[in-house]
Amino acid sequence: MFLYPSTAAPASTQELRVNPFVTIHELATKPDLSTNVDALRPERPTSLEGSTTLYRLRCFEVVVEEGGFKRATARLHTTQPALSYQIKRLEVELGAQLFYRKPGGVSPTEAGRLLYEHTQRVSAAVQRAKQAMTELSEGATGEVRIGTVNSIGIYFMPPLLWKMRERCPAAKLTVLYRDADDILDAMLANQLDVAILADPRTDRRLQYETLFQEEVSLVSGRSHPLFGCPSVSAKQLKNLDFVALSDHTPTGALIASYLDRLGVAVDPIVSTENVETVKRMVETGMGVAFLPDMVTEREVKEGPGRRLNRSRIEPPLTRRVVLVSWGEHASSRAVTAFVDEVRQANTTARQDAPPTSAETPR
């Protein structure tokens, strides 16, 4: 049986003269001992932490807003003695009088007005926290850390990110641009949740899903002799000036291997990892280049503003655009929603895409 020491004389006519200890059973069964309860509690806590509860602050806030205890009890669904007790304990904890009692109600003291300002901010923060937890449980918020390479990030990702924003407006989307190997290293270091890459290296700890196969076409600028040629042979590629994607990138390595199989030796004028740089150099007439079709989609459209030409070569060169993730493991609802949007975007792109030449087996 738990015992509490009786430290003060009771206010009622009945006193605890014989037994210096009061049992919990006695406190529960003798109404006239209830006035001793406050005497059994410490008058002032040693720390505000754990004692000044959110509920007491809420009680205080409602009393201020209602201008009295009676009206506040209706909002708080409590009794006036219980509410008075909570305010009394709050005043003891803070060491300040919070209200002036007056006929017809109460008004906050200077300390009360100051506390009310802080309490409003606390209430707003609590409400935001509750809303965030609700949204998180519904999959509407959370951080999605995405890794990708320049060509995919610039030309494939923007519509996808916009769709994701419409679906989950509270989600935080972070996109990291690096080369493919660095992106995979970041995935394995748990710095990224998902990646969209072209022909990445494989790792058994990750899940790989091919989204689509994309042609990598030979492109030339308006001033180049090949501009307007719908197709070229491997023989015609010899002795051409090339602007090349670095073979340190998966797509650059894919192109180099393809040219090697065709028996075409290339000594590029410029080599870079940036597809946008390669495209601009081709537009100025520095040479021809192999570029993924998504990179040149606008520039090859027929019309007076057409700046680039695509020429077909047999066999065609393609690259795989791959979704890399952790599968079903450790995926938040926001990450799951993003992966779903990627798959939907891929399905829509396939339906809208014009027929392409046969894909090379990989």
Image (spheres, helix red, strand yellow):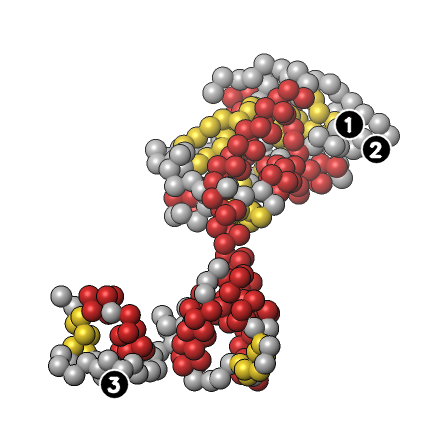
Disc 1 marks a residue whose amino acid type is Lys
Q: Residue at x 56, y 73 (%)?
A: 68
Q: Residue at x 50, y 41 (%)?
A: 138
Position of 210 relative to 3 (above/below): above
Position of 87 relative to 254 (above/below): below
Q: Which mark is residue 9?
A: 3
Position of 215 relative to 35 (above/below): above
The quarter of the picture where residue 120 lies is: bottom right
Q: Residue 13 location in percent, x, y?
A: 27, 82
Other residues around mark 2 within 10 Å, as few (<14) / some (14–19) / many (≥20) = few
Other residues around mark 3 within 10 Å, as few (<14) / some (14–19) / many (≥20) = few
Of pointers 2 and 3, the one earlier in the residue sequence: 3
Q: Residue 312 location in percent, x, y?
A: 67, 19
Is residue 114 something one can see in this rendering? Answer: no
Is residue 93 something one can see in this rendering? Answer: yes
Whether tag 1 and tag 2 are in contact, CB under 8 A, the answer is yes
- Which element type, helix, strand or loop, lies under badge 2? loop
Question: Which residue ends up furthest to the front in the rendered image?
Answer: 13
Disc 3 marks a residue whose amino acid type is Ala
Position of 190 relative to 78 (above/below): above
Instruction: Name the residue that disc number 1 marks.
Output: 301
Whether tag 2 and tag 3 are in contact, CB under 8 A, the answer is no
Q: CA distance from mark 2 to mark 3?
A: 97 Å
Q: CA distance from mark 1 to mark 2?
A: 8 Å
